Image (cartoon, coloured by chain):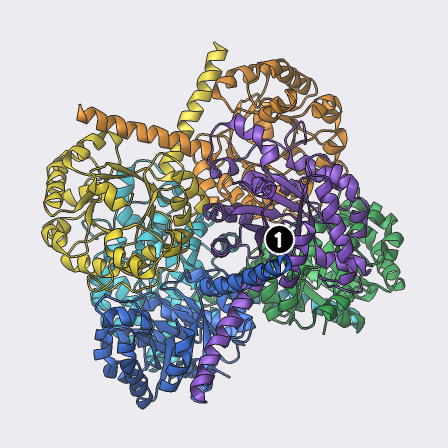
Chain colours: A blue, B purple, C cyan, D green, E yellow, F orange
Amino acid sequence: MSLRDSLLAGETLFTAWSGVPDALTVEIVAAQGFHAVTLDMQHGGHNEDSVLRSIAPVIAAKKHPLVRIPVGRFDMASRALDFGAEAVIAPMVNSVDDARRFAAAMKYPPLGERSWGPTYGFPRHGKGDAADWLAGSNQRTLAFAMIETRAALDALDGILETPGIDGIFVGPSDFSIAWSNGAVMDSTLEDMMETIAMIAERVRNAGKFSAIYVVEPKIAGRVVAMGYQLLAMGSEHLLISLGAASLINSVTASIDAERL
Amino acid sequence: MSLRDSLLAGETLFTAWSGVPDALTVEIVAAQGFHAVTLDMQHGGHNEDSVLRSIAPVIAAKKHPLVRIPVGRFDMASRALDFGAEAVIAPMVNSVDDARRFAAAMKYPPLGERSWGPTYGFPRHGKGDAADWLAGSNQRTLAFAMIETRAALDALDGILETPGIDGIFVGPSDFSIAWSNGAVMDSTLEDMMETIAMIAERVRNAGKFSAIYVVEPKIAGRVVAMGYQLLAMGSEHLLISLGAASLINSVTASIDAERL
Amino acid sequence: MSLRDSLLAGETLFTAWSGVPDALTVEIVAAQGFHAVTLDMQHGGHNEDSVLRSIAPVIAAKKHPLVRIPVGRFDMASRALDFGAEAVIAPMVNSVDDARRFAAAMKYPPLGERSWGPTYGFPRHGKGDAADWLAGSNQRTLAFAMIETRAALDALDGILETPGIDGIFVGPSDFSIAWSNGAVMDSTLEDMMETIAMIAERVRNAGKFSAIYVVEPKIAGRVVAMGYQLLAMGSEHLLISLGAASLINSVTASIDAERL
Amino acid sequence: MSLRDSLLAGETLFTAWSGVPDALTVEIVAAQGFHAVTLDMQHGGHNEDSVLRSIAPVIAAKKHPLVRIPVGRFDMASRALDFGAEAVIAPMVNSVDDARRFAAAMKYPPLGERSWGPTYGFPRHGKGDAADWLAGSNQRTLAFAMIETRAALDALDGILETPGIDGIFVGPSDFSIAWSNGAVMDSTLEDMMETIAMIAERVRNAGKFSAIYVVEPKIAGRVVAMGYQLLAMGSEHLLISLGAASLINSVTASIDAERL
Amino acid sequence: MSLRDSLLAGETLFTAWSGVPDALTVEIVAAQGFHAVTLDMQHGGHNEDSVLRSIAPVIAAKKHPLVRIPVGRFDMASRALDFGAEAVIAPMVNSVDDARRFAAAMKYPPLGERSWGPTYGFPRHGKGDAADWLAGSNQRTLAFAMIETRAALDALDGILETPGIDGIFVGPSDFSIAWSNGAVMDSTLEDMMETIAMIAERVRNAGKFSAIYVVEPKIAGRVVAMGYQLLAMGSEHLLISLGAASLINSVTASIDAERL
Amino acid sequence: MSLRDSLLAGETLFTAWSGVPDALTVEIVAAQGFHAVTLDMQHGGHNEDSVLRSIAPVIAAKKHPLVRIPVGRFDMASRALDFGAEAVIAPMVNSVDDARRFAAAMKYPPLGERSWGPTYGFPRHGKGDAADWLAGSNQRTLAFAMIETRAALDALDGILETPGIDGIFVGPSDFSIAWSNGAVMDSTLEDMMETIAMIAERVRNAGKFSAIYVVEPKIAGRVVAMGYQLLAMGSEHLLISLGAASLINSVTASIDAERL
């Protein structure tokens, strides 16, 4: 089932967040219990080459491959799709103009201006008839605009009305910095929670999808209740750190128990 | 403090076990609470290039860099040291002849036949006077021979007497396969535990160091009690798997709690 | 003979189209009977690093190295030249402003704003006197603007008049999508052929060079007759696919013949 | 169906022969009409890292991944299996001792001495129960010994009787050099054909599998009639060369036709 | 001591200029007597991946890591900081608007619009408290705007007044091209020296830092006297060329002496 | 002119010594005034992949590509030739048996046992007729055995008589360690100079070529006088170090002069 279809069916989906630009590491992450893997080119270490190479193991593991592009790099939105990504997340979409440029890169005419050439993505997803593939592409691949500043919030309705924008992705850490005018970085800042709930509501009213980064697991239930369906979590930095702590604790406990 | 000095001081040390041949992934592993990182070229994915590149972040994190070479690849033992490894683990040292060839590659004359050329390792460890570096090398760097077959066990005393062999590393999974003649693969096989304890004792009597792979954390206390000082654990496959399970569990628990 | 000189001499030139970001694969492609190799960063997998590394084998094979940059990435146009490219193809040059920005990145002052620093390209092309190299660069390296939308067609005369634009490159697949308003993707769409011929004529009248992607070999004669001199063809995907089909057919035929 | 099962079922299988150490190039080759892809570490450019990374796309394309190791590098035979290869081809197996060492690296005890640690291969083939995986491994993965010298021919019966050797792979180019004592390199040398047929017969009598490199497609029918079931063919050098010639011919023909 | 603190203390600092996108080469450069290493993405070969990987050995060598981004690639300015760079140099800052966009990418709110996510940089610099790290970041990391055209010179005061711009970096080769309207490329062009001195003065008056590329060592004393504190020099191309000439000369002299 | 022909003509040749496994770095080294570049896989960082990729720029710069293999890795000797190396240097050839195994890997039958498959080397050197290439290969490519222990010295005559061994390469650092029984590492140890001269004499008498590593330039004249024709020198570590010292000295001198 495609990412769009799963979201339309009301499912709550987890996407891992990969920041190590290495296809083998991504292969290991893709084997875990997430529904998708997002390759992060903004703050993570992913680059053109690692995205090209890492989408393959995500597809092989039957997970949804997503890519977050760097700020304003809409050329890369098209390329991520050409390489086989099912969705692209664009950071800092702070105006309707940003949203339009993002949508233009994501969608083929007449909706947008994406250029034809899914060199890797078409065969990776099974190939078939090129005309059919072209015809279905605009619907199959999703454009998520990140809302993480006050300007973005002000422009939210316009962004949601932009043809080709399929969903909103909330970056709560940056949003808290913006909300506090640089004073605080707190992804669960209570002050902004009402606004975050309101965003989900306006997205739902616009018939689009809501996604959010879950920095603190404890917030997950609350944002799902607000309507967020796609939850991002867990870079390799976090996964390895959690795993190492757990393993070292177990080993240390065994040693301590023996010593008693 | 060097690896040798820590072991001489009676410390119990944990080494992570890296199988992803990517220096960035190793950098993340090296930042965790292990005392050392072993780059595995036998079953892991490490290769000449990844070992060369990955030793740097281990040293930068002030951890001990170790390398496990492929079976019989003693050329690589020398190279690992040239690249800056503090110890090398050789698998399947099943005879005194194997031990001699391993030691020859690990130690400069007159003890062995290692060739001079620590191109990367010398500057990485701070450089200084080359003559001093040469003079201290044979003691500074440790050769661990793996005991994991019945043949190796039979040859244990000869291996321990081989000049240049600094310690023994037990591979309990392979040992269990050998012990059961291929019938069982169980790193905590009760039947072989007495023998594993006996190995540590003979190693201690020979004035050398004991190391072991800890597949199951629960065995840690027991092997430490036997005298094993260097405990290997946790490939990235395991760390990421533990971390992902923990994270997904936390997120799922939060969602489930909210739904109640 | 430089690419410019060959084109001025009226030659018809074939450029392979490389989409595999690997210098060894490009080395093999460059050994075939093409006159040039274009490294594709828009739909192909080429990136900054692969372009830097792959231009070397193209020059070593005495072929012309060209680079197609991603949409709007004029920073990369300069870099491709710095790495030794003889020409750059910019996709989606849809306005005179796009053409100006492209030319600015391609040409040194006073014609453009390219910054000095041909770190790799200068020695790769034989080095010599830096002043001479600077003096000849604006003429030696060619800027091809892609015409593949209706907007581009409307702006064609202005684009052709933009100082620093040396030629036009027609992307017939995208042009057909644009021509049919997204309904059809057909690089040989009969409806647009008159327009494609007209483009070549206007380019010729402006004293510039015409290039086109030949998706279907059968169209080659027709576009050459129109005046297109540089014909692009054949990604590795196509070359390997044609080669594998040919080889498998020969082997299968031999087996079938024997079975009779 | 596994490679073994297909061979047991009497199928004739084609394996592409990859010499470009790049997972993306291998991905393209694996998408063609071959049943398998062999990654060549002897004369091709594959190395530990490229084998590790390239087996993944072969499995993803539902083809059989094979690896040819360098001469005498039996450490790599085990590693290829750990990375997920279904079969390993060892060149220059010229004696029973060579065959024994190869088999020892390929098979777990008690048949051989392979060490446990299928870090990548186990999850890539779907994972499941480790005990089952261990139990089935010796049968699942195939060891092909190359016969390409007179010494090898003399030792053929002993090699075929070596437990753990599953098949023979004939290298006809080297065999012709050996046959002519260095005078001729001709993979279809008529003089040696009777011997090549005899090899297949003895292999069949020993209940093992026959494979051969098909340098000239025209020989395919004849070797299949002899009993060879696995036919190797077509490095990327050949595939790209055939493809480029075909494409350039078509384009040139179109241009020539138009000019008439 | 941070780069800022060293500059505030009035020190003259040398930065090597790296153009080889390989972390091992950078490791060797970082071991030399420079105070910093600048990874050049404009004319050098550095790319996203090489910057990510090469900052680590620069920090390990206790040198300051700097990055020069490609023209207009302000997305990369943020990424360089996320990867651990202490300063970013932006070429062709020709207007106040350019300066504003550069500063926006370099500084967190409220000064700029940098997004939170120092995935690699935070742990590489020792980690600690995230709130403290955020609070100190805008001051800790430096934004150098390159002045290398007449337009930039005209806008100098506005650029210097732009909040978030910490210093000016003069590119004397490009400046000479601009100064001579494309006629001359001479980094020590006498005509422009007065202006270059004036730039340093205005920068000093604005309380900011001055940096310059020293193409010819003989100019160093003069620019230091003008007030330039950070001197860039020596790509690997130059270092290897100087080293090879020196070595070959010594060897040749020894041979010639012996022959006499 | 081939390496062999230059040596036969009595020329003294300099080979750079590359230890950075990166084709771009090698490209820069190959552009300097050396006659050859040796890629070092024993103490340097070169590996299978970097050798494959780095031979290309050496050939493109019209220099001789040489490879030093790791100890005992004769499989790699064949591969280096397959990739296009003109000569291979094998370290620690301490017995006639070592020499025979090295020669077997270097020469086609009937002289040795090299297997046919110059996949990359044949096209890189211009291709042509395969039969001619095969016929000329044994003479065209040179096998240098390293003499660096007392055992090697004892076996020298036998090594020189081994068919397929074309020359001797003296490793003076290791030789000094061997000579002093591990007490001293001094490539210009006076005690061993007579022996080093004697080696050259015996090599000349055997009609073969002499090569040596020149650690100290001042020794060059003396070893040339002894008959050494191929002088190895200068890893990137040394070249960059010499270059950086030279550059920093020039800059510092300029600053100091201005301050007076």
Counting from the top left corner in percent of width and height, residue F104 is at: 73, 38
Q: What is the x, y in percent for residue B84?
A: 54, 41
Residue at the limit of the structure toward the top, as seen here: E260
* Residue F211 located left or right of residue C254: left
Examine the rendering and report whether any part of residue D176 can be seen: yes
Q: Which residue is mark 1?
A: B231
Residue D191 position within the rendered picture, expressed as x and y whole percent measured from the top left: 83, 51
How far across and how far down the image is residue F43, in percent? 57, 36
Compared with A144, D45 (above or below) is: above
Please say whether residue D107 is visible from this viewpoint: no
Which chain is mark 1 on? B
User: Compared with residue F235, is residue E156 higher up or lower down, i.e. above or below?
Assistant: below
Along the viewing direction, whichever of E159 and A227 lies nearer the viewer: A227
Name which residue type carries label 1. Answer: Leu
Give the left or right position of residue B39, taking residue D112 as reference: left
Closer-to-camera residue (A25/C24): A25
Determine whether the residue tagged by mark 1 lies in a helix, strand or loop.
strand
